[in-house]
Image (cartoon, helix red, strand yellow):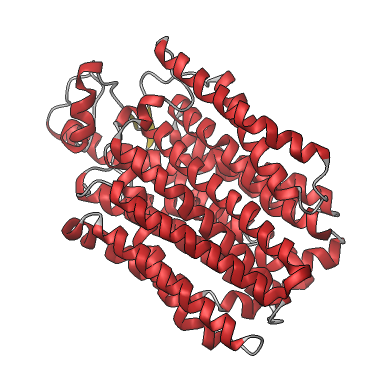
Amino acid sequence: MSDTRAQITTPEAPAGRLGALATAPEAAFPDAPATPEAPAAPGPARQQQRTSTVLTPLGLLTVLLGAALPMIDFFIVNVALPTIDHDLHAGPAMLEMVVAGYGVAYAMLLVVGGRLGDMIGRRRMFLWGLAAFGLTSLACGLAPDAWTLVAARVAQGAAAALLLPQVLATIQAATTGKRRAKAVSLYGGTAGVSSAVGQVLGGLLVSVDLAGTGWRAVFLVNVPIAAAAWLLAARTVPETRSPHPARVDGPGTALLATTLITLLLPLTEGRAAGWPLWSWVLLAVFPFAATAFVLVERRAERLGRTPLVPPSLLRIPSVNSGLLMLVPFTLGFGGFMFVVAVALQNGLHFGPFAAGLSLVPLCAAFFLASLAGPRLVLRFGRRVVVAGSLIQGTGLALLALTVHDGWPGISVAALAPSMAVLGFGQGMVMPVVMRIVLSELPMTQAGVGGGVMVTTQQSGLALGVATLGTLFLSLLPSVGIRDALLAALLTQLAIVAGTTLLTLRLPRTVR
């Protein structure tokens, strides 16, 4: 069992070695990195140090469980929305806030969460995040009205932002070589599978109606899981941190929050509120906030400070090309999950369990593809992502044909083939792209790099709900559910075509 008091400190790289670290991170950072000042411990002492600072299989399982919780909760409410609407008289605008409020708070604070982990210890922040996530989940489950639920969901998103960045940073700092590649692939698989599992689990919990809790069970179930993960993490996850952590970038944090809010809030709530003046004002502010954020971050790095999102990080080819592809992929993914959950229940009149069951083939295929990814990418490089993107597009086209020809008599079994093809393609894309983003990341930027990637992922998911969800809901009154769903699917198919072209910018080989 690992000594939970042991810590890894990541040596800061001199500027002249940055290129070498970016191209050969595994050679630069052995399994048990030591601080520059500390000589290597001799004999058994050195072996004990190496053992105490390596992420064990149980430790990896624990951090992946912690990562799954916030990912599942972004989607778990989708199939519960009709029941929440009925019980709390929420209305369309409040229902979108239940989903998007969590996503906006989550995305807004992720980079800060990564920076805090670098400063005070990633294991410590992981434990705090788990505790906060359990408490805010309890608050969601006990919410007496819609506004309280929205507030609790925002707080839950903030807790998730403390928790999730520590997972990738711990993997980066406490694993190397093939173990790191496998761990990152498993993280990517967890991200995708959790998204589908969230809706399956949500449908099951609402249908079972445990002790009369109904939709509340989708939040209350997190409490014992978070408690179990906390106990495991306290014993199995090694402490890691940067020896020279940067302070939180206050101006950058405020401008990033302003940028995300001015984009996501009006896109999410504008349609339901009738596009009032405030929604247009916020959209008009967005480009100015985004430009100010970029300028402030560039100036901070030029002056030798550590910005929230270092521009030099985005100049690393694998980071730049990977993040550029991650945005449209997660946008389509997040929008698809929201739209399908609503369409299956309101259009095909599936119950929550049947709606969740419809996604089981997608979930299983995604998981199988993510397991095969590490071996495939070593042999075929970025061609794995190209093939996955094409398979994903094929699955969307098959699903659109199924909806067009079979509506409204489509069964769960009829949806299975297209869902399986779609999930397999997505499972070949998402874990590999995440691995590409992290492949050349200097260890000194493990926390902020992981935070930037997950912020991009969560912003894309929230933007997908805001854009594809708004398109679908706005078309409902005029064309009906089937045609509104087809419009959303064909829009996502166009997005997939764009991401397929973006795969050509990825590195040919993947470490």
Q: Residue furthest left?
A: 43
Q: Residue furthest front?
A: 478
Residue 232 shows in the view: yes
Residue 440 percent location from the top left of the image: 27, 37
Task: Please tell me in which quadrant of the rendered image residue 81 appears.
Answer: bottom right
The residue nearer to you, when weighing 390 against 313, is: 390
Residue 378 percent location from the top left of the image: 18, 56
Q: Residue at x 63, y 66 (%)?
A: 339
Residue 218 percent location from the top left of the image: 67, 63
482 lies left or right of 241: right
Q: Is residue 290 above or below residue 483?
A: above
Q: Residue at x 78, y 69 (%)?
A: 477
The residue nearer to you, when weighing 65 against 493, is: 493
319 lies left or right of 282: left
Residue 201 shows in the view: no
Q: Residue furthest top?
A: 303
Residue 510 percent location from the top left of the image: 22, 49
Q: Residue at x 76, y 40 (%)?
A: 279
Q: Is residue 90 above or below residue 132?
A: below
Q: Residue at x 36, y 38 (%)?
A: 320
The residue nearer to you, when weighing 309 against 286, is: 286
